[in-house]
Amino acid sequence: MTTAPAGQNRARARGNASDGAGAVILAACAIWSLISAAGRETGPEGVLLALLAVAAGFACGRICGTLLPVATATIAAVGALLMGLLSRHGMPGATATVDTAPGHAGAAAALLVLAAGAACCAAAAARQAPLRCTLRVLALGAACAALSLRSVAGFAAALGVLLCSLAAARMWQRLLGLAGLALAAGLAVGTSWAVAADALPQGLMVSLEGPLTPNRVLLWQDALELAGEHPVLGVGPGRFAELSPTVEQTVHSDGKPHSAPWQQAAEQGVVGVVLLGSAFGWLLYVLWRSPRTTAVVLTAGAALTALAILASVGNALSFTPVTAGAGLLAGLASARRPIGHGSAGPDDEDGTDGTDGTRRPGGGRQAPGSNGVPGPRRPRTESRIRLRPAHRSSTDAGVRG
């Protein structure tokens, strides 16, 4: 009778450990940005604002995901979709001073990817089939909206999130899926490094320069040179625009290298890149330990990985709505169940154990006594009750009396 509370306590302890690790990593990112900015005319406010947006979005997702997971994810999907479509003339959080903020198209595509991820998470957590179908149509609409922004990468990323969500409904082990997503993000970062270092064959280099544009490749090469000159501390947050020759020669430039890993490498050194990778790894670890079902976990992981790939070749993380939306999605997918509802996910009727993402044999319900716990005892009937015969001496006394 003590197995269920013990399992809930273990799941709660793992969740507390992952939350503590996230707090340490985010605090280390903030402290290192201040260390790299010490003694220089830099602006670490952008980094601190992004970290604050991630933490606030994560906390909001945890709270709302515990109370109303499907409704909150649906509202987040619709809000991100509308913001992505209505941000053609700039977006809140842009730092450029021109009329149309450079990089806003990439940020809008990132919001559409988050919208598709939130809609698919809501569909994975919903129990009614018509609602699930409607939410997946909403995710498909977010993918098609990326084409209206002329973002082929955004369309491919949002469509990939939808396909991953459909495949996640048939997966039993979440660890293998999350490992594949981490590998995909690592390959994207490695490819950007190979392009900046000119380490690819000439034909492949030319084919990649077309979609990436030569200006972006030059920005990455400038970031590589700055990271080589200042490998530990970097040049300081916000100083890439001052020291990059490509930025000075580019009209209406926003002063960003249009790649989150390269911006960290140039402005905060190797330690900044390691901390950025640790933050992404922490999000995947939180999803792995999430009490939600495997379908919800892998869908959110696919959306965050697609966002990481877009951020490795774009300027998406420089906008506050994107970072807050990423934290919100991670919080929704890792929210705990209310007290008294157990540690499993909301749609555990299919036999999925929300703690580790595996399926129990024979579905979610088990017969009494099939798991080693004895079933209820049968009531004793009158026919099974035997009367104890009276003592012989008492019988003789009654006769004599």
Image: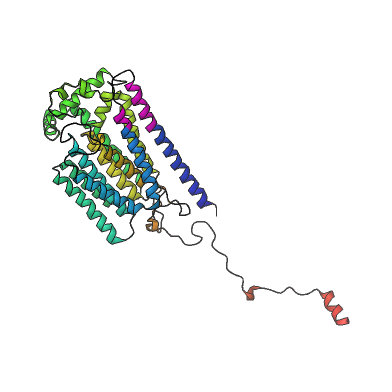
Q: Is residue 374 left or right of residue 124?
A: right
Residue 149 higher or lower than 226, as above or below? below
Residue 55 higher or lower than 32, as above or below? below
x, y percentage for residue 393? 84, 74
Please give the range of residues in magenta: 26-48
Say whether residue 167 is visible. Answer: no
For the point 61% across and 71% down, the residue is 380
Is residue 275 within the magenta segment?
Answer: no
Is residue 38 within the magenta segment?
Answer: yes
Image color mode: rainbow
x, y percentage for residue 137? 22, 55
**Which quarter of the rendering shows the C terminus?**
bottom right
Residue 361 higher or lower than 275, as above or below? below
x, y percentage for residue 361? 41, 56
**Which quarter of the rendering shows the N terminus?**
bottom right
Q: Quadrant of residue 330?
A: top left
What is the magenta segment's predominant secondary structure? helix
Q: Quadrant of residue 251?
A: top left
Q: Quadrant of residue 382?
A: bottom right
For the point 31% across and 29% down, the residue is 45
x, y percentage for residue 118? 29, 48
